[in-house]
Image (cartoon, grey):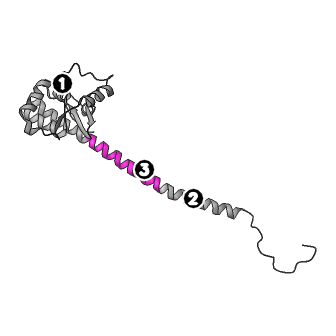
């Protein structure tokens, strides 16, 4: 976890990152709070600088997406009585916001936001690597299990008394038969 000497720990920021449309994003209201501006001002700057916020940097949630998000976090979060659907910003959009807001706090916080996105990528990468290693081990165990079962079968066969398959060599008296 990146260390920072800010009043907002990176963990607090990572808890505000959501996965929507196969992207990690942050809500406009969360970024406004972190950057020390009102949400209206943040959105105003997005509208004034549309070339800086292409769809891959920022987009507005659909009603269904927002509904799913509020249902998912209904107990722990409250977004109040919004009249419009929120915008969400990817990592690049969050950095771009700091350049159009031009406040010291926005610049400082954008660095922490980037650190939070990077931290989540590292965690995801670690989980993927761990999952790959587990699958690899499972594959090896399958092969080893078959070999071990074969080995046990061979040991069992060696432990059984051998059946006489051949006639004994030598003279056999009538009494022995």
Locate the C terminus and report the quarter of the image it occupies.
bottom right
> What is the number of the mark on residue 148?
2
Between the residue at mark 1 and the residue at mark 2, the CA separation in whole angstroms equals 64 Å
- The residue range painted magenta reads 119-139
For disc 1, the marked residue is: 84
Quarter location, residue 112: top left
Residue 57 picture location, percent across and down? 16, 39
For this view, does 18 lie left or right of residue 136?
A: left
Q: How far is the residue under mark 3 from the one under mark 1?
A: 45 Å
Badge 3 marks a residue whose secondary structure is helix
Residue drawn at 76 percent across, 72 percent down: 165
Choose between 161 and 57: the one closer to the eye. Answer: 57
Which of these two is toward me, 1 or 144? 144
Marks 3 and 1, the one that precedes in the sequence: 1
Residue under numbered circle 3:
134
In this view, 73 is above or below 113:
above
């Amino acid at each position: 976890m990146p260390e920072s000497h800010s009043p907002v720990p990176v963990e607090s920021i990572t808890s505000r990152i959501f996965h929507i449309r196969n992207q990690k994003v942050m809500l406009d209201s969360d970024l406004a709070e972190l950057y020390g501006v009102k949400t209206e001002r943040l959105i105003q700057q997005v509208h004034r600088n549309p070339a800086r916020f292409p769809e891959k940097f920022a987009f507005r949630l659909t009603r269904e997406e927002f509904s799913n998000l509020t249902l998912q976090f209904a107990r722990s979060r409250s977004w109040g009585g919004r009249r419009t659907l929120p915008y969400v910003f990817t990592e690049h959009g969050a950095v771009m916001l700091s350049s159009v807001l031009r406040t010291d706090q926005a610049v400082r916080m954008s660095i922490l936001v980037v650190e939070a996105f990077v931290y989540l990528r590292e965690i995801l990468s670690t989980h993927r690597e761990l999952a790959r290693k587990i699958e690899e081990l499972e594959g090896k165990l399958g092969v080893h299990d078959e070999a071990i079962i074969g080995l046990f079968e061979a040991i069992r066969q060696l432990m059984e008394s051998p059946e006489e398959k051949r006639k004994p060599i030598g003279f056999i008296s009538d009494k022995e038969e």
